[in-house]
Image (spheres, helix red, strand yellow):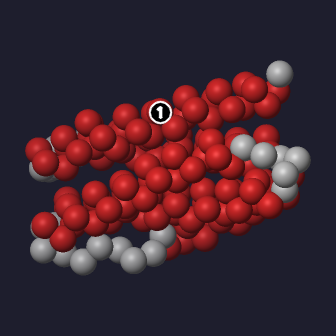
Amino acid sequence: MHNIETLNKLLKNELSATETYQQAMDKLGEDAELGGSEYLEPIYEDHKDAVSSLQEQIRQLGATPAEGSGAWGTWAEIVQGGANMLGKEAALRSLQGGEKSGAEAYEEALQETELSSDIRSLIETKLLPAQQAHIRTLDRLLGAETD
């Protein structure tokens, strides 16, 4: 049961990430001066893939995956919406904050002793490394932004 709760929490984070990246890409895509949405597309796709992986793990445990991002997703959308209005750098910083929070959630999940080996492996080999790569990408984009 504990694995299902952990997976659904991680799933909600990933659903929130997909919603937030979609919002940021829409904003950056509609304003040609801002640009940069093409750099976010691969990260968005990674988050969609993570959603699928987590949903599959939950189904394999005989449970129903969470369908929405919940209160965290609503909060993330509000924060990202405000950041989008403030410009590209603020939008990227908001996304970076979300990525760091997601990485922390994966690291916390790995501390759980009840976590099954399949789930542990998924987090260690796929989900956490992707999260860390997203942070590096956003670091680079922010570095280019402030130069």
Residue under pointer 1: 133
Q: Quadrant of the N terminus?
A: bottom left
Horizontal and vertical percent for residue 29?
75, 56
State the image quarter where residue 5 is shown: bottom left
Of residues 56 and 3, the one nearer the viewer is 56
Identified at 20% across, 61% down, the residue is 57
Label 1 residue SS: helix
- 91 is higher (above) or lower (below) than 51: above
Horizontal and vertical percent for residue 95?
63, 47
Of residues 124 and 70, the one nearer the viewer is 124
Q: Is residue 28 visible?
A: yes
Horizontal and vertical percent for residue 89?
79, 41
Horizontal and vertical percent for residue 128?
36, 39
Of residues 38 and 10, the one nearer the viewer is 38
Identified at 60% across, 56% down, the residue is 21
Q: Is residue 9 visible?
A: no
Q: Quadrant of the C terminus?
A: top right
Identified at 54% across, 71% down, the residue is 71
Label 1 neighbour load within 10 Å: few <14, some 14-19, many 20+: few
State the image quarter where residue 24 is shown: bottom right
Q: Amino acid at mark 1?
A: Ala
Q: Is residue 40 left or right of residue 50?
A: right
Q: Is residue 24 left or right of residue 35?
A: left
Q: Is residue 123 left or right of residue 2?
A: right
Identified at 69% across, 32% down, the residue is 141
Q: How many marks?
A: 1
